[in-house]
Image (cartoon, grey):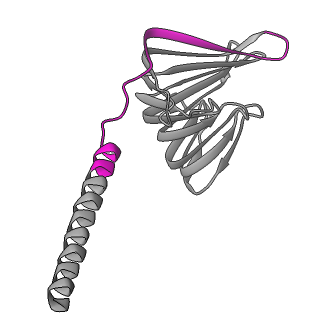
Amino acid sequence: MQAWFQKRHIVWIALSAVIVGIWLRHQTIEHAEKDESPQAPPLLVVHEGISYRYDEQGNSHMKLSAPLTHYYQDARGTEFTQPRLHHQQGEMHTHIRADYAQQNEAGTELHLENNVFAERQNGEDSATRFEFSTDKMLYRIDKNQAESDAPVLIRSADSTTHAIGTIWHLNQNLFILKQNVRSYYAPHHNF
């Protein structure tokens, strides 16, 4: 009788282990399916959208426009297709464009990618005009600073600089090259 009770006890333990194993497997599969669910659709899609940023005096100093903008309610932030950024500080006008940009959730950084091109000019004086191009650029909106680790090309009326990576302080119109590859100065060089 005791042997029969032990066998029955072993069967119950084995059956319990199988049931717990099946339950755990089912929970793991459900959890994995939740993790692999497609990302949520955009909260808002805007065609031909324009946003402005104002300084302390209430003057518009930055304008960001894009033919297509997707606002997400998650870590993806805001995505812009073919964004155009216009920044004005006094007489200094800066235009930046790219094929794609993504703004972080906090709205403090704009990651620009593919064919990033910037042009800066001080008023009507073409001698103060220069162009900047790269494939990727991070624009820190609050600091008014741009940074790239990719190859960059900086051209002005009389010089051309090729570098790998730069930090551009827009308020001071200062470039800090991470690695200068080649620079040359040629007065009256047309670009």
- Please identify the residue farthest to the front as the structure is shown: 1
Q: Give residue 6's position: percent from left, percent from top.
A: 21, 86
Q: Give residue 5's position: percent from left, percent from top.
A: 19, 84
Asked if the stretch drawn in magenta spans residue 125, the answer is no
Residue located 57% across and 25% down the image: 119
Q: Quadrant of the N terminus?
A: bottom left
**Above or below, comparing residue 141 to residue 47 in the picture:** below
Q: Which corner quadrant of the image does residue 139 belong to?
A: top right
Residue located 20% across and 68% down the image: 18
How many numbered tags mark residues here? 0
Residue located 35% across and 46% down the image: 35
Q: Give residue 86's position: percent from left, percent from top.
A: 60, 18
**Above or below, comparing residue 171 to residue 14 in the picture:** above
Q: Which corner quadrant of the image does residue 125 belong to?
A: top right
Start-end of magenta stretch:
30-58
Q: Give residue 36's position: percent from left, percent from top.
A: 30, 45
- The residue nearer to you, when weighing 162 against 99, is 99
Residue located 59% across and 13% down the image: 51
**Above or below, comparing residue 74 to residue 128 in the picture:** below
Q: Is residue 145 left or right of residue 163?
A: right
- The residue nearer to you, when weighing 134 against 41, is 41
- The residue nearer to you, when weighing 146 against 77, is 77
